[in-house]
Amino acid sequence: MARQNKPHTLDKGDLINNEMVEGYLGWSQRPDTKKTFSKYDLSEIQKRYFIDKNYTPVSVEHFDVTGDGTLETVVTSLSLGCGSCVMFYINIFTNEGNYVATTREGAIVKAESGKGFYLSTMESGSPETILYISKYDWKGSLFTEIARKEIVLKSR
């Protein structure tokens, strides 16, 4: 169940080339969900990205993760689809592009230094659940995992 000991990186995604998924679980069946965007400070291209991916934001924060003094937009979102409510999508919108991470029941927290962030994720199983906390640092064009802590929680 434990992950490999190699560093993970978050590469730049593409904001333009998105696939629209429609039907039973798409935006046309859940138009009220689009109202979510009115409470967040997102650009039109960022909103379009989430609509095209069928993701709904659950938190939007603005903090510096690249160390350049500019606030990036950090969004945690969920899929509109059924059965994926434990998968969180973390998007970091920088001047360079959109960086995407997927985490299971996780969270993102800014680093004290203003350069990078901490990302948590959880792997649930029997007889144990493993919580991973990774620190990512900005390396000029991507975020690279520089440290990881693994916490094993035993089931009773």
Image (cartoon, grey):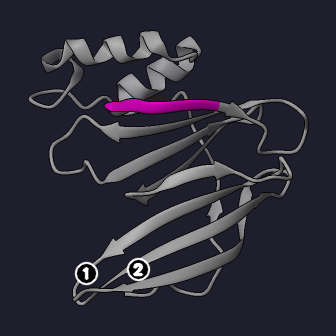
Q: Quadrant of residue 139 in the image?
A: bottom right
C-alpha distance separating marks 2 and 1: 8 Å
Q: Is residue 55 magenta?
A: yes
- Label disc, if present, on residue 125 of the rendered structure: 1
Image spot of residue 99 (x, y percent): 62, 45
Give the total number of marks visible in the rendering: 2
Image spot of residue 103 (x, y percent): 44, 58
Q: Residue furthest front?
A: 156
| Mark 2 / mark 1, whichever is N-terminal | 1
The residue tagged with tag 1: helix, strand or loop?
loop
Image spot of residue 102 (x, y percent): 45, 55
Residue flagged by tag 2: what amino acid is it?
Ile
Dominant secondary structure, magenta = strand
Q: On the picture, is 16 further left or further right than 20?
A: right
Residue indicated by mark 2: 130
Image spot of residue 8 (x, y percent): 62, 70
Residue flagged by tag 1: what amino acid is it?
Gly
Name the residue at 42% across, 27% down. 50
Name the residue at 54% across, 29% down. 60
Could you tell me which quadrant the C terminus lies in?
bottom left
Up the image or down, 88 lies above or below 150; here it is above
Q: Which residue is at the front of the view, 109 or 146? A: 109
Name the residue at 71% across, 75% down. 147
Give the residues in magenta: 54-61
Up the image or down, 99 lies above or below 11; here it is above
Up the image or down, 21 lies above or below 101; here it is above
Given contact means CB atoms under 8 Å apart, are the residues at marks 2 and 1 in contact? yes
Name the residue at 37% across, 17% down. 36
